[in-house]
Image (cartoon, rainbow, N blue to C red):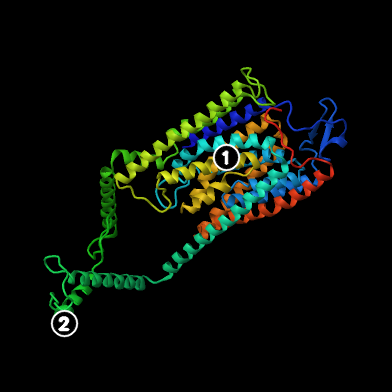
Amino acid sequence: MRCLLYLHCAIVLLILLLLPLAQATKGLDNDCVSDDDCYNTYEHCSISEKECIHKDVFPQEIMEFFGSIVLGLMIALSNAGGIGGGGIIVPIAIIFFRFRTKQAVAISNFCIFTASVVRYALNFNKKHPKKDAKIIDYSITMIMLPMVLLGSLFGVQINMIIPESILLGALTIILIYLSITSLRTSLKIRKKENLEKVKDDIPEEQRSESQEDKKSEEEKKNIQSEDLLNNDGDVCSIYENPIPPIPNSVKETSHESSKEKEGVPKVKKGTLLKSDNSSEEEKEIVSDEDSKDSKEKEESDVHPELAKIIWKEQSHIKPSTLILFPFLFITLIVLILIRGTSSVDSIVGIESCSAGSFVVLAILILFYVVMTGFNTILVKNEYRIKVEQGYNFVEGDLKWETKLLVQFILCAFGAGFIAGTVGLGGGVIFNPLLLSFKVPPQVASATGMFMITFGSLSNVFLFTMADYFHFGFGFWLGAYTALGTTVGIISVNKLIKKTGRTSYIAFILTLVIILSAIIIPIYGILQLIQDSNDGKNLLEFGSFCD
């Protein structure tokens, strides 16, 4: 298991080392003659390059110091709620570090990537709360990941041309919608937990009595329905009374016998009835032998194909994690380098916005559509085997029918698109979606963050090619993100263990989204007022080919 984790870390490190090779020579409209032409006091005009450049990490301003502390705290809160904190990182990067919105989105994606890597490491040995499986549901990731990467590609392209006024407006609308959705889901989870707690507080005697009462009522109804039929299956008259009344003596006898039966304890598999003549050691030996025999019998009864699926659910070592997911990401990077961008030349000499450029883009889109179809077939086949072989489904296991598949594929594309466009982690999309299908909050959180790992890293690569990503502050804030993520996850795990409630994750998630929905529009309006006073056109679009 640890070897697999080290392998993933090595792949991530290699990709990060290659990122500077994609650094572009031009990006934002930063032409300048003096510092007065720059966006704010945190930028200075480079005389040699004739463009505005954001200041380095050191020396730090007071606002940057406090911004780093605030970022760590908010990331801890966000990751406790199961999201990377993209909705918080963007306004913090704008307010405290004075980055432009598009630069803040690029840094946000890197911080989300850092958070997702830390979460993956911390969740590596975690188990599913309701069955013997890993906490990450890889069947969900297989369905959604190709469209997440494709959506990320389109999202970054839109981010480069869309006006910041529209960008901020879209971000605010999305966050308001997600706030309402997450709050409703959180209240449902809380209500369910309260009902379960009430049931647990009821004494066992009362629960058994209520169950017996329900059972007796059902038996009476069954007897009454049977009485209405004669031997030929025809409906009897209620006056015929085909079954004679039971004498009182028989009733008393049967009642006494049932009481005697109630006094006899039920024997479960792997257990032994207490006996005065048997020692405790003998009981334990027999119990262990019985449990081993029953376990071996159950394993031998499982169909080989179903046993293989169960084994894959219990392990991270599978073709999807070792081959498929890295292959999807590397293919995106290679085709983007072949295609080139307006800022970075193609490695094979294809001109920007030429016919060859659009052919490569079409190949990339087709590749992800085909991979989505291929993964869908694999997941549906596994689901079919589970149904046919009597797999023990638990609450939160998804029924992969056509309607559900289409819904998840569309949401995957939307999550990737939003991450690339406005810098929100896919967790704010994935988590509410998975929670709405009764997926346990821990599983929804871990699965959502795993999926966005690849999407956010691809976004960072694309933003680097467009010269939007600031390496110094990216890694500086990434370190605070890693620290905040660790603190947040450890804290919420202790809270769940202590209280037994998972609704805390859902409520913290909702709180973070609501805070983002409040902070971003307030600062966005102030920024737009400043841009308007500077004479900028707030609705001017860019070009894919510039």
Residue 2 place in picture, x, y as percent: 49, 37
Which circle's residue, 1 or 2, is located before the other in the chain? 2
Per the image, label 1 sits on a secondary structure element best described as helix
Q: Residue at x 64, y 40 (%)?
A: 421
Mark 2 and mark 1 in contact (Cβ < 8 Å)?
no
Give the foreground label among 1 and 2.
1
Q: Is residue 184 visible?
A: yes
Residue 285 place in picture, x, y as percent: 27, 53
Residue 375 place in picture, x, y as percent: 43, 35
- Can you tell which quarter of the image residue 119 is in? top right
- Can you tell which quarter of the image residue 230 is in? bottom left
Q: Residue at x 52, y 60 (%)?
A: 498
Q: Is residue 528 left or right of residue 273?
A: right
Say above or below: 467 vs 379.
above
* Closer to us: 162 or 261: 162
Q: Is residue 457 visible?
A: no
**What is the CA distance from the residue labelled 1 to the residue labelled 2?**
73 Å
Q: Residue at x 48, y 62 (%)?
A: 193
Q: Quadrant of the C terminus?
A: top right
Q: Tell me the residue that label 1 is attached to.
A: 416
* Closer to us: 77 or 243: 243
Identified by mark 1, the residue type is: Gly
In the picture, the disc for residue 248 is: 2
Outermost residue on the bottom side: it is 248
Identified by mark 2, the residue type is: Asn
